[in-house]
Amino acid sequence: MGGSMVGNGTPTGTASGNGGGVTRLTLLAPLDGWATPLDEVPDPVFAQRMMGEGLALDPTGATLRAPCDGVVLTIHRARHAVTLRADCGVEILMHVGLETVALGGRGFTVHVAEGALVRAGDALIDFDMDLLAREAKSLLTPLIVAGGPAATVVEARTGAPVRAGEVLLTLLVQGDGAASAAAGERTPGERTQSAEQSVVLPLVHGLHARPSAVLAAAAKPYAAAVFLAAQGRRANAKSAVAAMSLGLRHGDALTVLAEGEDAAAAVAAVATAIAAGLGETPVAPSEALPVPSLPSAAVPPHDEPPALEAQPPFAPGETAVIRAVTAAPGLALGRAFRLQEEEVEVPAGGLGADAERQALAAALDRVRVRLAAAVAHAEETRQTQRRDIFQAHLAILDDPDLLDEAQAAIAGGEAAGSAWRAATDRSAAALRALGNPRMAERAADLIDLRRQVMLALAGREPQPVILPQGAILVAEELMPSQLSNLDAGRLAGFCTARGGPTSHVAILAASMGVPALVAGGAAVLRIPDDAPLILDADRGLLHVQPPADDLAKLERETARRKVVAEANLKAAAADCVMADGTRIEVYTNVGKVADAVKGVAKGAEGCGLLRTEFLFLDRQTAPDEDEQAAQYQAVATALAGRPLIIRTLDVGGDKPLPYLPLPREENPILGLRGVRIGLRRPEILRTQLRAILRVRPVGQCRIMVPMVATLDEVRAVRDMLDHEREALGHAPPVQLGVMVETPAAAVTADQLATEADFLSIGTNDLTQYVLAMDRGNPDLAARLDALHPAVLRLIRQTAEGAAKHGRWVGVCGALASDPAAAPLLVGLGVTELSATPPTIPDIKAALRPLDKAACVALATEALAQESAAAVRSLLARTGLAVAITEGAA
Ligand code: PEP
Ligand code: MG
């Protein structure tokens, strides 16, 4: 136990020492907890004092406080570690829990910014003890004297419970603090030799505390001064704290420099230690990089998307057709209703940081309550997509980075409104900067939350928009909260100038059954209020002020489609057998258990594509074999014995998974995707295969491999499957199919069919690769048409190749969900279509009255067309699908 200490956490006096002055520094307990010697910390970096002297606390309280007055030197990006420099120059590291860097910031809320002056007892970091207890190696929190002038621990209170604020540690600090504080950064006097070497940081979690300590230990034995230089900054490599403060990330380039008589040896030793991983397993930057949920402050801001060019409104009676991207299919007639974005004026502030902080907290609470109510309502009404979106919004609202950033701005004198606006704008800009269209679409969610919190700060509630009956909403951009507040009964459809087909607004529109177009460009803003419109979301067209004849025709067509749809649904449960007896299996695509239920209700005869990655999207950790088996079993059970084709994990490219670090690649769409990841990380694929093999009844599941380009890949998966079957006690054989998504797979289908039991064409990716157009790029979406003759020729080639070996061919890409294309696909040799649930009744109805021969003739003609548009008009001209569905009605 400590003796004669004065507990205000400041240097409490000086005494004479060896030459210079000696300062006494008292450190107060930063936590409630049990004080423990460092030797008991199960981590050699701390236990062996590689970072410095100190002790550890086993927390019973969840707030880390400043142990003395000082300045905050660094807060680790993962928010689990903080260093302070006391007024006397001593640097103190506090590291909450062990190996907590891997949490990536989850469970931590930081109350101070780097550079902030703090007083002893000020709250620095709050942490979630339950989460740490579950997910961290240990809660033990080392407090280390990690740098600055030489300091000796003269009293340490260990082996006892302590309360935050009680005296914990007393140090005698050599020399004049201010002068010593800078010593770590001092350049050497004598420079007899210099050397340098460039390296790339191979640490997945960046240069955090533990590797920094190993690095400092590697540098210390040398007389030379050793530095790390990166991104225009330089730090003393012998100081773990200084090295850490560079904030280096995985893959960052840095230079090791040394000056002094043994400079070359020092550089070699430090560079070698870095390359060896500084105590962690080195991972080359091309092998792993975490995918952020929200980008951190280090991502450079990206400009707002360019403003749309202002153009005069369409004149009364002026007709126009605007081409846009389908977000949700359907046809609607109605009148334009322009949604104007109102400016939200927020109080200018000036009430002081505490009041502004409270105002922000209250506004966040109001929005939180509203979102929680929306989640509960969606849950009650079983609107799962709506529930998931609002849950995601709640999570964004609690994002610690956003909150930290806003709090730091408030601490710097900003008003709550401008602090929140700046934080959300920066995060939205950083999302856009990632260069991934899906991530960029998430920016709209942030802007939505920006607006909602600003409204709450202004003391206003979002006003419901009163729509006229049958309104087609036109807007520059629509936010999820705006759409969900609209009266769906009055909304006939919408078209936005911006936005993308995979945005939350698009998903909401589809779940509400509202036809929707996005990315229509500046022309959308030219539409006057109340203008008559035909929104043909099936074809991606918005007709503005169409001639009266067209309107009348469309009105009749809409009424007809309704009658036809009802009749088709009634007949949907029966198998799909064509007039000449040809059997076509119409299956459904599934991303979650509910889709299987929906699909069966719409007449699905099985599942032709279970996108397994969708089952585990919201997780931070990989699902284990048991969890996977349970999910696959749930889908199998929902299908009540119908066949279930499970696609192995298809991540990479446009499909990031939070729990699976993926490489940052120049061309992710051409990079590590689908089966390539499965073969590179075989443990992931093997676990999945084992989970699939456990599904009962035996024989219901088939396995399908995504993104195959070569026969070797199929053979490798077959070997793994055989091995796992054997390991499970000779499990019965399972069909193994291949997705045809690359031109290579289509062209070599005859070879793949020697190994594969079936082939299923993923027209989404196949079209992307054949046309060399990124499927996530809204600017290309209008031209990314799977009916392009080049794609159709590859579909035929696939079917011919498979037929040589008696294998069947299906289509599970979006083209299979287009009833008009069904006869064409059958004519090309496809015998299975896996579609979205709502389209199944129409597909079956389109095919039943047809002969296969008529479909083959149609296909032959389609293959000779010169463009996708020509194929579309051929389908419309021959009118097979339309005539048939009319007949069914
Ligand atoms: C496809 O590419 O057509 C396909 C079905 O796979 P996904 O859309 O999941 O990439
Ligand atoms: Mg695909």
Image (cartoon, rainbow, N blue to C red):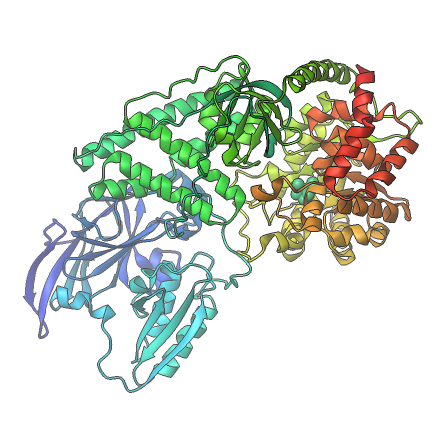
In this view of the protein, which residue sits in the foreground, 167 or 413? Answer: 413
Examine the image and state in which quarter residue 712 appears: bottom right
Q: Residue at x 64, y 24 (%)?
A: 330
Q: Is residue 731 visible?
A: no
Q: Position of residue 747 (x, y in %)?
A: 80, 53
Question: In this picture, is 800 found above or below 180?
Answer: above
Q: Is residue 858 visible?
A: yes
Count the labels in the image: 0
- Classify residue 236 as left or right of residue 768: left
- Classify residue 167 as left or right of residue 43: left
In this view of the protein, which residue sits in the foreground, 130 or 373? Answer: 373
Q: Position of residue 19 (x, y in %)?
A: 8, 75
Q: Residue at x 67, y 55 (%)?
A: 679
Q: Residue at x 24, y 34 (%)?
A: 357
**Quadrant (top left, top right, bottom left, bottom right) of the C terminus:** top right
In this view of the protein, which residue sits in the foreground, 48 or 96? Answer: 96
Q: Position of residue 775 (x, y in %)?
A: 62, 44
